[in-house]
Amino acid sequence: MTYLTVPISGKNLQSCKEQIGSAVRAGAEMLELRTDYIESLNIDKLKELIAYTEQTSLPVIVTCRDSAQGGQNNLSADLRKQILIEAVKLGADLIDCEFANFLKDDFGNDIKKTLAGNKKTRLILSEHNFKEPFENLAEIYEEMYSVFPEAIAKTAYQANHINDCFAAFDIMHEYGGKAIAICMGPAGIISRIITKKLGAFLTFASTEANTQTAPGQLTIEKMKKLYRYDTINKETEIFGVIADPVGHSISPQVHNACFATGNMNKVYLPLWVAGGQMDFNSFLDNVTTRKWLDFKGFSVTIPHKVNALEYAQKKGEYIEPVAIQIGAVNTLVIRDNERITGYNTDYAGAMDALTQVMGISKKQLKGKSIAVLGAGGVARAIVAGLADVGAKITIYNRTMEKARGLAGEFKCHFAQADEIQGSDAEIIINCTSIGMYPKTDVSPLPTKCLNASQTIFDTVYNPLETLLLKQAKQAGAKTVNGAEMFINQAAEQFKMFTQCDCPMEVIRKAVLNALTSKI
């Protein structure tokens, strides 16, 4: 069993008791008493706190952290040792001692003697690095086990890149329930969830975002509701969104909601892959060489869509022809043979969103005059789809070189961005980020360009109704919001990930909830 453990970090006994109550109600499976957070800590306070935890029936770790490894209040070595020894005598299930201190005779020997006389309590030996990964993680674990074979060995280190996490995954895969391996920071968030799949001893979660005791620690609510922690086991398949940055992505809420509806043993994670092609390649190489991680598919977004295409071209098995034409991949699927296939669902999502609102088929877009604002990745995917059905396209962009290049590839017209004011296009599609949160008070088009005979499509989906769409409605035009494109492209990804039809009501509700609320 991997225990979902909540650190209790109150500054006084009352706040500790309140946190314990919150942790129990939230579904904690273990408590860690971070006694170093308690002001004016003494043995009597420890006794009262342990007695209080006995009412919960949850296993308890007592930790009195050294300030050199993240401890609070700069407690003396003598007091920290006394707290740990007394915790053993009071029947704590586990104590956590820094390995560096355990190696000191005047510290470690006294704890060994106390543990020898109290067989109930287990020892966690821990090492922390809040700046960077350890140079040789495997050696640290080997040394800990050689010094105290019965110990649960723990490391927690700052992951400065998602690729720093794989050493921790290897440790958990090798040692399972005898190990704890936490990667701190935003790049290490996935390690806190994958822990359960790999069967490590525990993972940590806080009761509230402001009570976290380490960088990147998720709340227990987010672990359970968003990432479906309770359903994860060693057979769970892993999916995720590759992006830089990734924190804003609503894809985890959307895909996990669909997995839950189908009772699928799958989880979808945010994968912050910083850097360029080399970092992207390294991440996928790390994934594909560890079959036991069970990564099965990825959504790919800014800035890695071109990187995904190049990776799939070099090491993949199949790439959808239209993805090659677009020059970008937004979906990667790892097949049973461990080979990667690449697709682009952006164009299909956009075409479906547009034709659904207009009440026409894709073929009926042939010959329609369409103005596309922007010449970036989104515009490229949409232009490819429109060109395929024979629409009359004009690309409007501030940078003429980019507009000229895109228009040349798909044999369509191009013009300077401000020339759209003279356009008589039946359909206008905004593929820029103008109007996106937080700058929601701007529009890419003057109102005089809008009229009731048009259809206006804004690919921006946050906010749901941009200023452009509000003005288009006032002018009597039909409107298509970016959420519809997102819903359709995500539904296509879901089909590729699962070989099942997407529950459209579920995905639509999940997208709207994610855009209007926060977990």
Image (cartoon, rainbow, N blue to C red):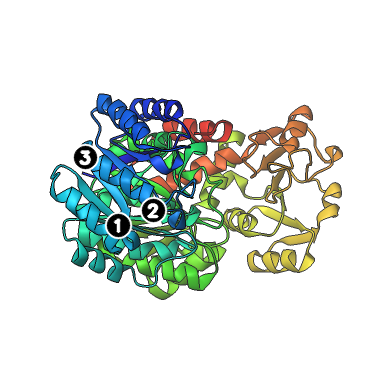
Relative to 77, is 408 on the left or the right? Answer: right
Evaluate if marks 3 and 1 touch, with contact meaning CB atoms under 8 Å apart: no
Between 388 and 74, the one lying in front of the other is 74
Evaluate if marks 2 and 1 touch, with contact meaning CB atoms under 8 Å apart: yes
Q: Which residue is mark 2?
A: 77
Residue drawn at (19%, 61%), measured in percent from left and top? Answer: 148
Give the mark nearer the N terminus: 3 vs 2: 2
Q: Is residue 415 visible?
A: yes
Q: CA distance from mark 3 to mark 1?
A: 16 Å
Image disc number at residue 119: none
Relative to 518, is 473 on the left or the right? Answer: right
Q: Position of residue 217 (x, y in %)?
A: 44, 45
Assess disc 2: are there few (<14), some (14-19) or many (≥20) residues with their C-alpha within 10 Å of its C-alpha. Answer: some
**SS type, badge 1:** helix
Q: CA distance from mark 3 to mark 2?
A: 19 Å
Q: Is residue 289 visible?
A: no
Q: Which residue is mark 1?
A: 107
Residue drawn at (53%, 34%), measured in percent from left and top? Answer: 518
Q: Amino acid at mark 2?
A: Ala
Assess disc 3: are there few (<14), some (14-19) or many (≥20) residues with their C-alpha within 10 Å of its C-alpha. Answer: some
Q: Which residue is mark 3?
A: 89
Relative to 188, is 171 on the left or the right? Answer: left
Q: Position of residue 55 (x, y in %)?
A: 26, 24
Q: CA distance from mark 2 to mark 1?
A: 8 Å
Give the mark nearer the N terminus: 3 vs 1: 3
Give the mark nearer the N terminus: 2 vs 1: 2
Q: Position of residue 169 (x, y in %)?
A: 31, 60
Residue drawn at (67%, 41%), measured in percent from left and top? Answer: 457
Res. 319 image quadrant: bottom left
Q: Amino acid at mark 1?
A: Phe
